[in-house]
Amino acid sequence: MALAWPVIKELLTLRERLNELFDEALLDRTMGVGEPSSGPYCPTADLYETDDEVVVIMEIPGVEAGSIDLQLHGDRLRVAGEIVRADTGPGGQYVRMERPSGPFFRDFVLPVDQFSGAPRARLERGVLTVRLPKAAGMRRQVVSIVEDGS
């Protein structure tokens, strides 16, 4: 016996809300990891810092480089784009759909708020790498400790 469409629609809505709740619970805003994404898809990402730059690495398989929007505002980086579902062609129809599609974005709180030079971004095999060179005043400096001789 097939379920009625209204029941399926309610279950899909419930699933989306549960995904949002898990995103909110798992993403630690105090650590600057990021914010929940828009919609049901939240691309996975890593963010790390070196002495000279901040690097964000994000998995976004199937997204074209030209459809990615990167915006840097102070200590915030937004990565937005859209995953387009493959066209099945004439007479084709999906039997199973598991891969996400539609618009997405991720916001990141960066560990510094001043950068120098142009940010660099590279999309290779579905992995986006964004490199943000730190301004000279934001770079880590080694402080020498002088031991008191007395």
Image (cartoon, grey):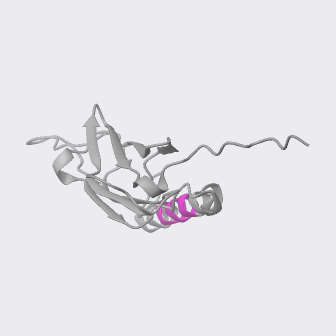
Percent of width and height locating residue 75? 45, 64
* Residue sticking out furthest to the left: 90
Q: Residue furthest front?
A: 150
User: Where residue 33 sits: x, y (%)?
Assistant: 55, 54
Q: Position of residue 25 (x, y in %)?
A: 65, 60
Name the residue furthest right. 150
Query: On the picture, is 74 further left or further right than 50?
Result: left
* Residue 41 visible in the current orientation: no
As for residue 14 lying within the magenta part, the answer is yes
Residue visible at 11% across and 42% down? Answer: 91
* The one of 21 and 2 positioned closer to us in this rendering: 21
- Is residue 73 shown in magenta? no
Residue 44 visible in the displayed image: yes
Comparing 84 with 121, the one in front is 121
**Residue 46 location, x and y as percent?**
49, 43
Taking the spot 53% from the left edge, 56% from the top edge, the residue there is 111
| Residue nearest the viewer, comparing 10 with 14 | 14
Q: Nearer the viewer, residue 43 or 136?
A: 136
**Eyeballing the image, is 9 above or below 86?**
below
Count of numbered badges drawn on the protein: 0
Furthest toward the top, the residue is 125
Instruction: Characterize the magenta stretch by its predominant secondary structure.
Output: helix
Kindly indicate the quadrant of the structure image that contains residue 17.
bottom right
Range of residues picked out in magenta: 12-20
Q: Quadrant of the C terminus?
A: top right
